[in-house]
Image (cartoon, rainbow, N blue to C red):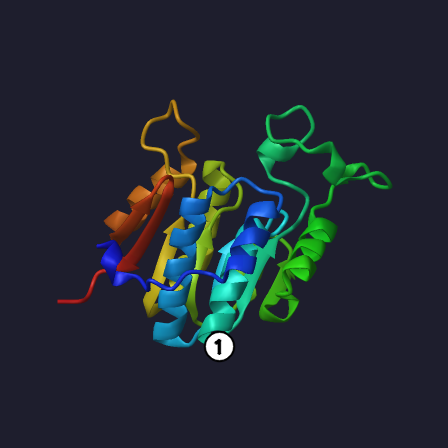
């Protein structure tokens, strides 16, 4: 059902900025995220939102999609790094540690990433913990992209906090969905299965990226 998504691609300079940015999302998954964001934003005229900013790699594509649709991208992160990015873990990057406080701080890198891509005017950074911000959020969203903490606690909280804010024609995107435990953690996969059980249907699959929408009533 991927033909239901907009075929627009990001501008070459935006895609180059995405590839240059610090982060983990492959290009094919990034293009699928971009297509979903353009589709949802054009359809609803509402903002797109991601949980899990890190250094802004995927935010580049969401910002350009928002620019294309005449809306804005929101990105939620406390910028202290998720579990697997802490010292001693596989994805720890010591260059992202604030030497003064001794903790991860990805916010400065994120801001430099957006500046280099020329997309600062199309992004609103929401700095804080996802459940707290979700509880304060009162508006509707075109797209919710779940790519934050990968424990069951955090992935579930992101889904429960933000999926209810989706507009009727909005899209839910879940990253790092691995049906086989040998390929990766299972928390995003369990969120994906829960969404299917709770009225969402699959629109597209690209690598570990799943795009979902609510089933039509009736």
Examine the rendering and report whether any part of residue 139 can be seen: no
Is 30 on the left-hand or right-hand side of 212? right
Is 68 on the left-hand or right-hand side of 202? right
Given the current orientation, which residue lies at the most extreme right position?
100
Given the current orientation, which residue lies at the most extreme front position?
12
Q: Is residue 65 above or below residue 112?
A: below
| Mark 1 residue element | loop
- Image x and y of residue 99, in percent: 84, 38
Picture quadrant of residue 209:
top left
Seen at 60% across and 39% down, the residue is 82
**Label 1 packing within 10 angstroms: few (<14), some (14-19), many (20+):** some
- Image x and y of residue 178, in percent: 36, 34
The total number of labels drawn is 1
Picture quadrant of residue 45:
bottom left
- Image x and y of residue 92, in percent: 65, 31
| Residue 156 or residue 28, whichever sits in front | 28
Quadrant (top left/top right/bottom left/bottom right) for the C terminus:
bottom left
Q: Is residue 107 above or below residue 217?
A: above
- Image x and y of residue 86, in percent: 66, 32
Is 99 on the left-hand or right-hand side of 86? right
* Residue receiving disc 1: 70
Examine the rendering and report whether any part of residue 114 can be seen: yes
Seen at 69% across and 47% down, the residue is 106
Quadrant (top left/top right/bottom left/bottom right) for the N terminus:
bottom left
Picture quadrant of residue 192:
top left
């Amino acid at each position: 059902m991927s033909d239901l998504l907009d075929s627009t691609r990001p501008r070459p300079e935006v895609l180059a900025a995405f590839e240059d940015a610090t982060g983990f999302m492959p290009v094919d998954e990034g293009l699928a995220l971009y297509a979903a964001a353009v589709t949802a934003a054009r359809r609803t005229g509402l903002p797109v939102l991601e949980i899990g900013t890190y250094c802004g790699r995927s935010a580049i594509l969401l910002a350009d999609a928002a620019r294309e649709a005449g809306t804005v991208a929101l990105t939620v992160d406390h910028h202290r790094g998720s579990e697997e990015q802490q010292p001693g873990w596989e994805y720890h990057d010591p260059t992202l540690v604030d030497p003064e406080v001794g903790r991860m701080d990805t916010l400065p890198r994120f801001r430099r990433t957006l500046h280099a891509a020329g997309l600062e005017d199309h992004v609103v950074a929401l700095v804080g913990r996802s459940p707290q911000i979700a509880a304060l959020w009162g508006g509707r969203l075109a797209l919710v992209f779940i790519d934050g903490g990968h424990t069951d606690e955090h992935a579930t909280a992101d889904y429960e906090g933000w999926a209810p804010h989706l507009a009727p024609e909005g899209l839910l995107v879940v990253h790092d969905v691995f049906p086989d435990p040998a390929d990766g953690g299972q928390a995003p996969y369990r969120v994906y299965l829960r969404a299917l059980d709770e009225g969402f249907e699959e629109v597209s699959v690209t690598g570990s990226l799943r795009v979902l929408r609510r089933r039509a009533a009736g």
